[in-house]
Image (cartoon, grey):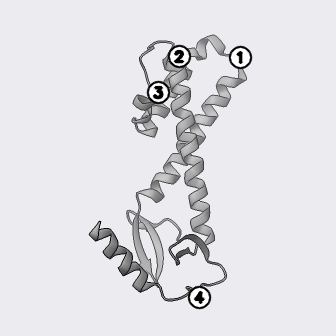
Amino acid sequence: MGAVRQLGQLHAARIRGPARLDLPHSARPVRVWQNQAMAMIIDPEAAAYGIFQIAFATLDTRLSRSLLALGRRKDAEITFGTLNRMAFGRRLKKLREAIEAVKPNLQDDPVVEDLEIACDLAENVQKWRNDRVHAEVQFLENQPLLVDGTESLYG
Protein backbone atom coordinates (compact mmCIF):
# COMPACT_ATOMS: atom_id res chain seq x y z
CA MET A 1 0.00 0.00 0.00
CA GLY A 2 2.95 2.33 0.63
CA ALA A 3 4.05 2.13 -3.02
CA VAL A 4 0.56 3.01 -4.21
CA ARG A 5 0.44 6.03 -1.87
CA GLN A 6 3.85 7.20 -3.12
CA LEU A 7 2.72 6.93 -6.73
CA GLY A 8 -0.41 8.93 -5.89
CA GLN A 9 1.63 11.65 -4.20
CA LEU A 10 4.06 11.76 -7.13
CA HIS A 11 1.17 12.07 -9.56
CA ALA A 12 -0.50 14.79 -7.47
CA ALA A 13 2.74 16.77 -7.45
CA ARG A 14 2.90 16.68 -11.28
CA ILE A 15 -0.59 18.11 -11.76
CA ARG A 16 -0.68 21.82 -11.13
CA GLY A 17 -3.86 23.28 -12.50
CA PRO A 18 -5.71 22.55 -15.73
CA ALA A 19 -3.71 21.23 -18.64
CA ARG A 20 -3.46 23.37 -21.76
CA LEU A 21 -2.98 21.68 -25.06
CA ASP A 22 -1.48 23.60 -27.95
CA LEU A 23 -2.34 21.20 -30.73
CA PRO A 24 -2.66 21.89 -34.44
CA HIS A 25 -6.24 22.14 -35.65
CA SER A 26 -5.88 18.87 -37.62
CA ALA A 27 -4.82 16.90 -34.53
CA ARG A 28 -7.34 14.53 -33.04
CA PRO A 29 -7.04 13.82 -29.31
CA VAL A 30 -7.25 10.07 -29.09
CA ARG A 31 -6.92 9.59 -25.37
CA VAL A 32 -7.20 11.88 -22.39
CA TRP A 33 -6.11 10.32 -19.13
CA GLN A 34 -5.39 12.08 -15.86
CA ASN A 35 -5.13 15.54 -17.46
CA GLN A 36 -2.72 14.31 -20.11
CA ALA A 37 -3.59 13.94 -23.79
CA MET A 38 -1.98 12.19 -26.67
CA ALA A 39 -2.69 13.59 -30.11
CA MET A 40 -2.35 11.86 -33.42
CA ILE A 41 -1.92 13.76 -36.62
CA ILE A 42 -2.93 11.40 -39.40
CA ASP A 43 -2.13 12.31 -42.96
CA PRO A 44 -4.53 11.17 -45.70
CA GLU A 45 -2.13 8.58 -47.16
CA ALA A 46 -1.67 6.89 -43.79
CA ALA A 47 -5.41 6.91 -43.18
CA ALA A 48 -6.08 5.40 -46.61
CA TYR A 49 -3.48 2.69 -46.00
CA GLY A 50 -5.07 1.89 -42.63
CA ILE A 51 -8.45 1.51 -44.31
CA PHE A 52 -6.83 -0.72 -46.94
CA GLN A 53 -5.37 -2.92 -44.19
CA ILE A 54 -8.84 -3.33 -42.69
CA ALA A 55 -10.24 -4.26 -46.11
CA PHE A 56 -7.40 -6.76 -46.66
CA ALA A 57 -7.99 -8.31 -43.24
CA THR A 58 -11.66 -8.73 -44.19
CA LEU A 59 -10.66 -10.41 -47.46
CA ASP A 60 -8.25 -12.63 -45.52
CA THR A 61 -10.97 -13.67 -43.06
CA ARG A 62 -13.50 -14.36 -45.80
CA LEU A 63 -10.98 -16.52 -47.63
CA SER A 64 -10.48 -18.61 -44.47
CA ARG A 65 -14.25 -18.88 -43.89
CA SER A 66 -14.80 -19.98 -47.50
CA LEU A 67 -12.13 -22.67 -47.21
CA LEU A 68 -13.60 -23.76 -43.89
CA ALA A 69 -17.03 -24.24 -45.47
CA LEU A 70 -15.50 -26.18 -48.37
CA GLY A 71 -13.12 -28.15 -46.19
CA ARG A 72 -15.72 -29.32 -43.69
CA ARG A 73 -17.28 -31.44 -46.44
CA LYS A 74 -14.14 -33.61 -46.45
CA ASP A 75 -12.73 -33.06 -42.96
CA ALA A 76 -15.10 -32.33 -40.08
CA GLU A 77 -12.13 -31.64 -37.78
CA ILE A 78 -10.80 -28.66 -39.75
CA THR A 79 -10.93 -25.37 -37.82
CA PHE A 80 -10.85 -21.69 -38.68
CA GLY A 81 -7.68 -21.30 -36.61
CA THR A 82 -5.88 -24.02 -38.54
CA LEU A 83 -6.74 -22.41 -41.86
CA ASN A 84 -6.04 -18.87 -40.71
CA ARG A 85 -2.47 -19.80 -39.69
CA MET A 86 -1.70 -20.66 -43.31
CA ALA A 87 -0.21 -17.96 -45.49
CA PHE A 88 -2.73 -16.02 -47.57
CA GLY A 89 -1.17 -17.25 -50.83
CA ARG A 90 -1.37 -20.88 -49.73
CA ARG A 91 -5.06 -20.50 -48.81
CA LEU A 92 -5.73 -18.80 -52.15
CA LYS A 93 -4.04 -21.72 -53.91
CA LYS A 94 -6.31 -24.15 -52.01
CA LEU A 95 -9.36 -22.18 -53.13
CA ARG A 96 -8.18 -22.33 -56.74
CA GLU A 97 -7.77 -26.11 -56.37
CA ALA A 98 -11.31 -26.39 -55.01
CA ILE A 99 -12.63 -24.36 -57.96
CA GLU A 100 -10.75 -26.59 -60.42
CA ALA A 101 -12.23 -29.68 -58.75
CA VAL A 102 -15.82 -28.56 -59.38
CA LYS A 103 -15.20 -26.85 -62.71
CA PRO A 104 -15.87 -29.93 -64.93
CA ASN A 105 -19.36 -30.30 -63.41
CA LEU A 106 -20.15 -26.57 -63.68
CA GLN A 107 -18.69 -25.62 -67.06
CA ASP A 108 -21.62 -23.39 -68.02
CA ASP A 109 -22.00 -21.75 -64.62
CA PRO A 110 -20.81 -18.11 -64.69
CA VAL A 111 -20.10 -18.30 -60.95
CA VAL A 112 -17.01 -20.42 -61.66
CA GLU A 113 -15.60 -17.74 -63.94
CA ASP A 114 -16.45 -15.07 -61.36
CA LEU A 115 -14.59 -17.06 -58.69
CA GLU A 116 -11.53 -17.36 -60.94
CA ILE A 117 -11.59 -13.61 -61.59
CA ALA A 118 -11.94 -12.98 -57.84
CA CYS A 119 -8.92 -15.20 -57.15
CA ASP A 120 -6.85 -13.29 -59.74
CA LEU A 121 -7.87 -9.99 -58.17
CA ALA A 122 -7.09 -11.24 -54.66
CA GLU A 123 -3.65 -12.39 -55.83
CA ASN A 124 -2.93 -8.96 -57.35
CA VAL A 125 -4.10 -7.18 -54.19
CA GLN A 126 -1.91 -9.49 -52.09
CA LYS A 127 1.15 -8.70 -54.20
CA TRP A 128 0.46 -4.94 -54.01
CA ARG A 129 0.08 -5.16 -50.22
CA ASN A 130 3.14 -7.36 -49.71
CA ASP A 131 5.31 -5.02 -51.80
CA ARG A 132 4.46 -2.24 -49.34
CA VAL A 133 4.32 -4.16 -46.06
CA HIS A 134 7.68 -5.85 -46.66
CA ALA A 135 9.43 -2.93 -48.35
CA GLU A 136 12.53 -1.18 -47.07
CA VAL A 137 11.80 2.30 -45.71
CA GLN A 138 14.25 5.07 -46.57
CA PHE A 139 13.92 8.78 -45.86
CA LEU A 140 14.39 11.42 -48.54
CA GLU A 141 14.12 15.03 -47.40
CA ASN A 142 12.41 13.89 -44.17
CA GLN A 143 9.74 12.01 -46.13
CA PRO A 144 9.44 8.21 -45.87
CA LEU A 145 10.07 6.39 -49.13
CA LEU A 146 9.21 2.71 -49.61
CA VAL A 147 11.83 0.84 -51.63
CA ASP A 148 11.28 -2.63 -53.00
CA GLY A 149 14.69 -4.09 -53.79
CA THR A 150 16.28 -1.53 -56.06
CA GLU A 151 13.51 0.90 -56.99
CA SER A 152 11.02 3.13 -55.23
CA LEU A 153 7.41 1.97 -55.16
CA TYR A 154 6.27 5.58 -55.57
CA GLY A 155 8.91 6.90 -57.95
Amino acid at dot 3: Lys
Q: Residues within 10 Å of mark 3 (few under 14, many from 20)?
A: some
Instruction: Specify which label sits upstream in the sequence, 1 or 2.
Output: 2
Mark 3 or 2, closer to the camera: 3
Mark 1 residue element: loop
The residues bearing labels 1 and 4 have C-alpha atoms spaced at a distance of 65 Å
Task: Determine which residue is flagged by label 2.
Answer: 101
Tag 1 near tag 2, CB within 8 Å: no
Kindly report the distance in space between the C-alpha atoms of the residues bearing marks 3 and 4. Answer: 54 Å
The residue at which mark 1 appears reads as: 108
Alpha carbons under labels 1 and 2: distance apart: 15 Å
| Amino acid on which disc 1 is placed | Asp
Q: Earlier in the sequence, mark 3 or mark 2?
A: 3
Q: Which mark is residue 94?
A: 3
Question: Which residue is depicted at the point 54% across and 88% down?
Answer: 17
Which label number is shown at residue 22? 4
User: Who's the residue at 46% across and 32% down the image?
Assistant: 91
Q: Nearer the viewer, mark 2 or mark 4?
A: 4
Q: Which comes before the other along the chain, label 3 or label 1? A: 3
Specify the quadrant of the image occupied by residue 48.
bottom right
